[in-house]
Amino acid sequence: MTATDELTAQMHAAMPFMALLGATAVQAGPDEVVLFLGWDATRCTTGGLMHGGALMALADAAGGWCAMLNLPDGATGTATTSSNTQFLRPVTAGHVEAVARPLKVGRTVIVLDTDLRDAAGTLAARVTQTQAVLR
């Protein structure tokens, strides 16, 4: 998938930290949000492993955006209340793609799963997060 300039600009305006991190947006809809982060030595920890915080930030942004696209009537936004990350393998080159999908969309909370896959398409991490619906 290829990032789009328009979606990336929207994401950077709404979440400036994603601009600082260097993330780009590929797709954004209520059923799925796809974000992309290229491997770079500045995003790594010892041994050239992409930093877990970078992966978690990308997943939080994807999940948060997906939650925003699923807000119930009368809601004004969301805030992450919990996030559980399972790291399955390191990302050492290429890129990581985050794909967030809603598990449950409710009146007070939205729960999302985000898969993080490396350039080979191998699952590197899975994040389940809960977003509180703000009114």
Image (cartoon, helix red, strand yellow):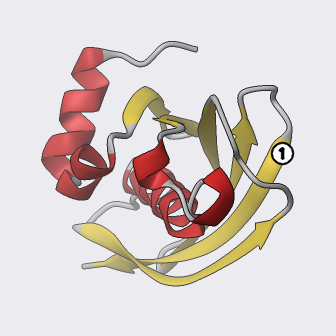
Q: Quadrant of residue 102?
A: bottom right
Vertical placement of residue 23 versus 44, above or below: above
Give coordinates of residue 45: x percent, y percent: 56, 64
Residue that appears at 54% across and 38% down: 39
In the rendered structure, the answer to whether residue 125 lies left or right of residue 42 reads right
Residue that appears at 50% across and 40% down: 30
In the rendered structure, the answer to whether residue 108 lies left or right of residue 134 reads right
Observer able to see residue 113:
no
Vertical placement of residue 39 versus 108, above or below: above
Give coordinates of residue 65: x percent, y percent: 40, 51
Question: Label 1 neighbourhood size at 10 Å, few (<14), some (14-19), many (20+)?
Answer: some
Q: Quadrant of residue 10?
A: top left
* Residue type, mark 1 in image: Leu
Vertical placement of residue 19 versus 108, above or below: above
Residue sitting nearer the eye, 95 or 9: 95
Residue sitting nearer the eye, 105 or 27: 27
Under circle 1, the secondary element is: strand
Q: Quadrant of the N terminus?
A: top right
Residue sitting nearer the eye, 65 or 22: 22
Residue that appears at 63% across and 41% down: 99
Residue that appears at 38% across and 40% down: 23
Q: Quadrant of residue 77?
A: bottom left
Residue marked by disc 1: 123
Give coordinates of residue 63: x percent, y percent: 51, 57
Residue sitting nearer the eye, 69 or 128: 128
Give coordinates of residue 14: x percent, y percent: 18, 50
